[in-house]
Amino acid sequence: MIRSTLAALILTLASTAAFAENDSGFYVGVGAGNFNIEADDVDIGDFEGDDTVYKLFAGYRFSKFISVELNYIDLGNPGDQGSNFSFETEINGFAPYFIVTLPLGPIEAFGRVGYYFYDIETSGSFAGVSQSFSDSSEELVYGLGVGLTLFDHLHARLEYEFFDIEDTDSANAVWLSGAWRF
């Protein structure tokens, strides 16, 4: 019993020291997830679509509590179809973020807020008439997540983000990402 407790204490202290090495500095990463978008009462009726998405990111940790990050986010090609319409959209762009982290031992809880600068291309048909348009815009994006550092430098994150995209009722993504902290 004493040996088990002592071993657990040594492992905890050793892991805490390993996590402390990455309190500040650069990091790079990649993430994959699922994006869902819903819009009610648009010209073609109600729209709901989802797609598999990915992002690439780089950031800098000023301390274990504060960091900044730049993401390239590809929100895929969510689409929908009904009895007299089909609709598909493509959304991608860049987002700078400000991130606040609460370290809880080897686990970190974090909140993020940023601005998504994106291009959107939409195509579809309504009652047999094809239409398409493209636009560029920027919107607020924010989210919450948890992370865990493994093997001294590999940081895994699970996060949920909200995109405040114009003319939508909801637009959100769930991400699983990994980052290498230098």
Image (spheres, grey):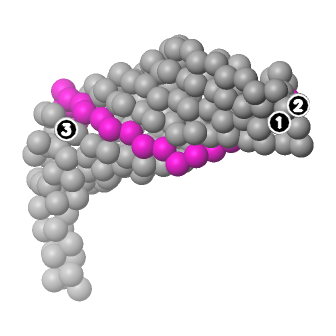
Q: Which residue is mark 2?
A: 127
* Disc 1 versus disc 2: nearer the observer: 2
N-terminal of the pair, mark 2 or mark 3, is: 3
Query: Which type of secondary structure does the marked residue at label 2 adopt?
Result: loop
Query: Which type of secondary structure does the marked residue at label 1 adopt?
Result: strand
Q: Nearer the viewer, residue 62 or 51?
A: 51
Q: Nearer the viewer, residue 150 or 73?
A: 73
* Residue type (three-letter) at the residue carrying disc 1: Phe
Cα–Cα gap, marks 1 and 2 = 6 Å
Looking at the image, how many numbered discs can be counted on the residues? 3
Looking at the rendering, the stretch of residues picked out in magenta corresponds to 45-65
Q: Is residue 122 left or right of residue 152?
A: right
N-terminal of the pair, mark 3 or mark 1, is: 3
| Above or below 1: residue 157 | above
**Looking at the rendering, in which quadrant would you find the N terminus?**
bottom left
* Residue type (three-letter) at the residue carrying disc 3: Tyr
Q: Nearer the viewer, residue 91 or 124?
A: 124
| Above or below 158: residue 24 | above
Q: Which residue is mark 3?
A: 27
